[in-house]
């Protein structure tokens, strides 16, 4: 494999957002496969509690534990983790107060519910905290290092972490945990935890990628999201234009069709000589579809122009026909690699 530069060399936390339903989970998984290829180890994290990753990789629901879900081209591994706020809170209580057992009792009394729903900022810091902990995690424990007295840092457990994040409307707030917990904790372990999370999220090692399809609303959300994420001082990654379809006609014919200039007569003749019945009626229906197609292609070109205004690297991912299964994900991963995203 050539050692050409990838667009995100040096980035270790890839956050994937976009309008709902545009393909965040699918492309987060594809990006994880692309980053893993050639022998890397990548963790794919989901935080919405929907088991989207398990569905995508056709595996049983993920427990709150990292599991290998796929092998990339050239031998890398993708591991996955479904973080849930309650389990993360128990982890956190244990880590900072050594009170896992108390935490489990708290669950029964609904205190965890209280902490995670009444204080949504707390919920987000727990979710992002888990992802950033995986980014920082190194192979050896402190004890090992002490025993060997070597000062060199152990390698990271994961070469990269990909976060299947909340949709664009929530992303700036979700990532800006510092502001979120500001009203909650000014000092103490929650504050320190939030600061450590923010350190990773604000570092050049973190990039936020935006998924969109070529329609007005998702593109508008994408541009608004980019503005909001930049405003809170976080690094913008690339734009992944998903479900791209090739135009069915050459540019000249498309431009004419968009203006309703379709030679229905000639179309009917063609259909007739191909031996089709009701050629006249069929030609009428087909030309209607042609005009619709041409207008959609024109609209797509317009929204693409708007995306260019963001001046970010754009990747174009094809619409996969049929079931989007593992081979489909590998195909999308291949496209991301060809286009330099990983
Ligand atoms: N390139 C593609 N080609 C074909 N189908 C796709 C493609 N990308 C995504 N899909 C399909 O579109 C649907 C939505 O994708 P996905 O679940 O990844 O979106 P999402 O943004 O994560 O949605 P949500 O906001 O609900 O989490 C799924 O059925 C998925 O299989
Ligand atoms: Mg999803």
Image (cartoon, helix red, strand yellow):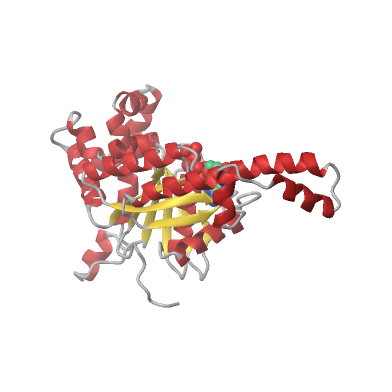
Q: Let me know if residue 184 appears in the view.
A: yes
Name the spot of residue 196 as percent of width and height, x first: 21, 47
Q: Give the number of marks.
A: 0
Pick the front one: 63 or 275: 275
Is 58 located above or below residue 333 in the figure? above
Q: Let me know if residue 99 appears in the view.
A: no
**Residue farthest to the left?**
187
Residue 130 is drawn in which quadrant?
top left
Name the spot of residue 339 as percent of width and height, x first: 44, 64
Pick the front one: 323 or 146: 323
Q: What residue lies at 64% left-to-right and 46% top-to-bottom? A: 262
Q: Is residue 54 left or right of residue 39?
A: right
Name the spot of residue 228 as percent of width and height, x first: 27, 40
Is 94 located above or below residue 106 in the figure? below
Residue 4 is drawn in which quadrant?
bottom left
Q: What residue lies at 20% left-to-right and 35% top-to-bottom? A: 179
């Amino acid at each position: 494999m050539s050692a050409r530069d990838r667009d995100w060399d040096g980035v270790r936390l890839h956050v994937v957002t976009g309008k709902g339903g545009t393909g965040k989970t699918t492309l987060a998984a594809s990006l994880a496969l692309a980053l893993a290829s050639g022998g890397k180890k990548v963790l794919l994290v989901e935080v919405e509690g929907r088991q989207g990753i398990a569905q995508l990789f056709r595996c049983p629901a993920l427990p709150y534990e990292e599991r290998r879900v796929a092998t990339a081209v050239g031998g890398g591994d993708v591991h996955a983790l479904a973080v849930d706020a309650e389990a993360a809170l128990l982890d956190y209580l244990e880590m900072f107060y050594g009170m896992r057992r108390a935490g489990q009792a708290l669950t029964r009394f609904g205190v965890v519910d209280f902490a995670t729903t009444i204080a949504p900022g707390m919920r987000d810091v727990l979710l992002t905290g888990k992802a950033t902990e995986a980014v920082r995690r190194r192979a050896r424990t402190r004890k090992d290092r002490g025993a060997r007295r070597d000062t060199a840092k152990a390698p990271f457990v994961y070469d990269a972490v990909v976060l299947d994040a909340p949709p664009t409307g929530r992303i700036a707030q979700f990532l800006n945990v510092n502001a979120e917990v500001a009203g909650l904790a000014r000092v103490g372990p929650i504050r320190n935890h939030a600061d450590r999370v923010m350190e990773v999220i604000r570092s050049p090692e973190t990039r936020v990628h935006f998924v969109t399809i070529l329609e007005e609303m998702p593109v508008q959300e994408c541009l608004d999201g980019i503005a909001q994420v930049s405003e809170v001082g976080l690094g913008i990654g690339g734009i992944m234009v998903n479900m791209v379809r090739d135009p069915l006609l050459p540019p000249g014919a498309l431009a004419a069709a968009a203006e309703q200039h379709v030679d229905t007569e000639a179309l009917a003749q063609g259909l007739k000589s191909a031996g089709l019945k009701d050629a006249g009626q069929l030609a009428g229906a087909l030309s209607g579809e042609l005009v619709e197609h041409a207008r959609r292609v024109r609209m797509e070109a317009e929204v693409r122009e708007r995306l260019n205004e963001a001046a970010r690297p754009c990747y174009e991912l094809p619409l996969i026909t049929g079931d989007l299964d593992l081979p489909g994900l590998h195909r999308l991963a291949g496209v991301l690699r060809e286009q330099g995203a990983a």
